[in-house]
Image: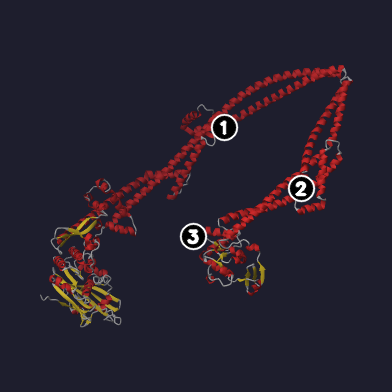
Amino acid sequence: MKLINWHRFNNCTIEFGDSTLLSGENGAGKSTLLDAIQFVIICSTGYFNKAAHENGKRRLTGYIRCKTGKENQPYERTGEISAHVALEFYEESKDKYFIIGAVVDSASEGQETTVRYLMENTRISDDLFLYGNQVKSIAEFRGSNIDIRQWCKTNVEARRMVTARLGRIEDKFFRLIPKALAFKPIDDIKDFVYSYVLDEKEVNIDVLRENVRTYQDMERTLDNVKKRMKKLKKIQELYQRVQERIEKDRMYEYFLKRSELELVEGQLSSLETARKNEEIRLSQAKAQLEMLQKERSEKQEIDTNIRVELRHNQEFVALEEEKKELKRLRDKRQEAMNEETELKKSVAQAARDCESLLRTIEAGNTSRYSAAVSTEMSQSANAENGTGADFASCIREYRKKLQTLDGDINVTEIKSLTDDVIHFKQMRYGELQEAQAQLKIRLNQNQTEWEKLSKKINKLKRKKLTYPSGVELLVESVQEEFAGIGREIQPGVLCEMLEIKDEEWRNAVEGYLNTQRFYVLVEPENFDIALGIYDRLRREKKVYGVGLINTKDLEKYDTAPAGTLAEVVTSQNKYARQYSNMLLGKVQMCERYEDLKKYSVSITKGCMRYQNCVASAIKPEVFRVPFIGKNAFTVQLAQAEEEFQKLSETMENQEKKLSDTKEILGLLSTESDVDIKYRLDVIATLRMLNKSIDKCEENIRKLKENSTLIQKQLQLDELEKMLRGLDYTISSDTEKIGGMRARIQDLVARKQTLLEKQITGKSEVTTLAADAGERLNSWNREYKEALGVRSIEQFQSEYFYKLPSNKRKYNSERCQIAKDNMINAMVEYKTEHDFGAAASLDGFPEFEAVYERLKNSELLDYEEKVQSAHKAAETEFHEQFLAKLQENMKLAQGEFKELNKALKGIDFSSERYEFQFMPSKKYRNYYEMIMDDFNVTQGESLFSGIFHEAHKDVIEELFEQLSVSGDNSAQALDEFTDYRTYMDYDIKIIHNDGTYSYYSKVCEEKSGGETQTPFYVTVAASFVQLYSNNIGGEAAGLVLFDEAFNNMDDERIGGVLEFLRRLPLQLIIAAPPDKIQYIGPAMDEVMLVMTDQKQSYVEEYHNAV
């Protein structure tokens, strides 16, 4: 190795043997030499000094410029620096030398340019790197050496060059070199095996994953098709159910029309029978009537003859005239008596009204009359029409006269008194009507206020204040609009966000703010949207006068000025507090009104305000109802309930007054009085008629005293009696005959109506029967069975008219339920599958067409595709996954056997080591499946037969893992495709007495030396494996150990070195001087690394022994 300007090695050449020990005190430069070697061969600066320090921070700059750590001179070398590290290798099989090296140019601290190169058939000499004493730069080095075979400016290119020239070894080389240098005790056996024993072997599953995904995509598509078919099948079944119900309804319609037709035909038959019977009775009645009429004619002829005979008798003629006059007078008297009866009714009613009115008037000012009529109206009436005493005396006199109507009366006097009563009543009626109207208006106003108060109290009980309608509308609209765009905000009303600290100043704050208390507040970022909503409400719903606070730029009002109303107001909401400070911070509080004018704006506790050079008192109505603070609810509720109670009492009194007024208005009705006025003359008329009737009866009595006339008269009376009897019978029979004719006509008309219904019914039944087609026979059978022995009316009632339910209604309800279920299923299908057909009975054919297409075409296609994809995935899974995993696992097991073979017979301080491998506890099922002999059986399906039955769950889980995607799934996939995952590992420690233990169980109890032995053994074996797997000729065989064998006793060191010496490796070991006596004898070369703090150098060590 050639080092130029590498830390303190200014120009140093070192020759290494097959095994070389580098020893020296700490800081002499042992690790520096190893870092130089790995800098060249692993093409990285990220692993410097890892053995000495876990978190080593050595940088390339420090090596090139020779970092000292001194504050005044951090680096020994300054300016532009060039450095060289070159490694010379001897290829024994070809007897050739080649150099792999690196050149670094450093223009300034941290500005390094590195290139690596390969020179064939060349050995190290100073003239390669120097012009005399001047170190060649990158450009000079390349320009002066024509034997450079490869020139690598990037680490990637350099790594390709190194692996190729050192025997085409695997990239694992770049991981093993740093790990061998950075020894760590073995804590995790599996991690150690992954790092040093078993290489990661990629199993390319891209095709498998694609096949699995294709299979699962196809399977999902097939499942989707089946799900769609299942849903469409359900829609089809529901449609069939609906059709069955519709068909049943058609059958019921046939039943109904047929039963109605049969009922009509039965009624026609009954009507025809009734008509015939009625015509027979009519014929009999006509014959009877003719006989009666003939008999009457005979009797009438006898009566006429007698009257002709008596017509020449003067007394008879006079008697007849008197009889006629008596009949006329009696008729008039009956009319007068009827009128007298009505008069008595009116008199009785008028008398009762008078009694009630007198009791009301005589009760005085506390009477219902006084309560019903307002004071103003009473005074006005009294002024115009005399006192209430005139009315009372008039009523008393009227009552008295009414009580004496049965005796001798002066009709004219009573009529005059009646006119006075009517006048007084009408006057009082008008007064009360006007008072009633006013009372109703006030009651309606109070009712409206009562309802408002009731709503207000309910809101207050729910902790909600009542604001002007515009405020509530704006708050609700803002909430709804923001909810519609997915943002939940709660606009606030200013008064709800404020609190008053001093109640003595509450009225002043409430009064001064007035309507400003109801301003709406939103967050600054929401103001513009809220303002847009407000503007729309202004245009569409005429919302005016509501304040919307812009809370932006209010920070300067964060503090309330001293002595102002703002001082007694606070808020937990910073925007509300800032805004109240802005409004109230200019209002000075004054204890005396005399001090108001000292300030531009001021106020007293009594709400005397001074502003704009004007003093004014705030109306109490403004601040009577408090709105500010959480106690406002309580105060408002108490106020509202008190007001509600008073208003309820007032309304109760008003309703009582209305009731009394209505009663008194009834008493003031003049209907009976007017009736009396116009019926009074009947009293005199009745007296006169009675006298005339008495005189007429006396005259008739005198005329009847003649004996001849009496005999003839008796005969006439008997004939008249018989004629009256016959007339009555004839009239009755004639009326009966008319009834019979009318009934016959009605029966004929009804028959005609039924005949028309019969024609219509037959047509309907024929149409329904034609529509039924082949079903008609079954309908007729069911109809007969349903009718049974019941009457048609009973049948119709049960099937069509019975409440609350009947068979047709039940069928209709079931039909509607089935239809709703079908439509819901259609809507669900449309939503899930973006289907455009209408969700209705009319749209069903489109659903059915999709079902038929899926069932008869797409389902078969997808099933074939799934089977094909399944087969492809199965083949790839078997050949490219399971088989590869089994192959890699068997090779790994072979490597362990080879490693154990190398370890056999070697004692490490009375112990021997054997590496163990076994199925993973976590993935035993997977291990057994992969290693199952059926895995490699040709022609046997993985998804059927013995292999599938044995490993069904594992296969399905692996398929699932192979098909998922994403970062987490990629990590899981790496684990499942790594053959090492399926085995657990341990080191069996065999003691001289034949007993053994396992490293995994005793590692925490072992000393540092005991945990190092497996490390060196395994690392060496890993390097042997690495170099033996080369494919490009002779491999280098280089291994580096730094700070080797710390805490190991001489016996263990000897055992490890014995093992290492037997391996085809070139060892370069760095260890402190106290290890020379244990390590040196086993080494071909021992080098001492020394420094004088200015320069480091290497001397060959010779053991005097």
* Quadrant (top left/top right/bottom left/bottom right) for the N terminus: bottom left
Q: Which residue was labeled with disc 1?
A: 760
The color scheme shown is secondary structure
Q: Position of residue 770 (x, y in %)?
A: 50, 32
What is the spatial separation of the Cα atoms under label 3 and label 1, in whole angstroms?
A: 66 Å
Q: Position of residue 1034 (x, y in %)?
A: 16, 66
Q: State the mark number for residue 776.
A: none
Q: Residue at x 78, y 36 (%)?
A: 342
371 sits left or right of 760 in the view? right
Query: Is residue 21 visible to us here?
Result: no
Q: State the mark number for residue 363.
A: 2
What is the spatial separation of the Cα atoms under label 2 and label 1, in whole angstroms?
A: 78 Å
Q: Position of residue 304 (x, y in %)?
A: 82, 19
Q: Residues within 10 Å of mark 1 (few under 14, many from 20)?
A: some
Q: Residues within 10 Å of mark 3 (few under 14, many from 20)?
A: few
* Quadrant (top left/top right/bottom left/bottom right) for the C terminus: bottom left
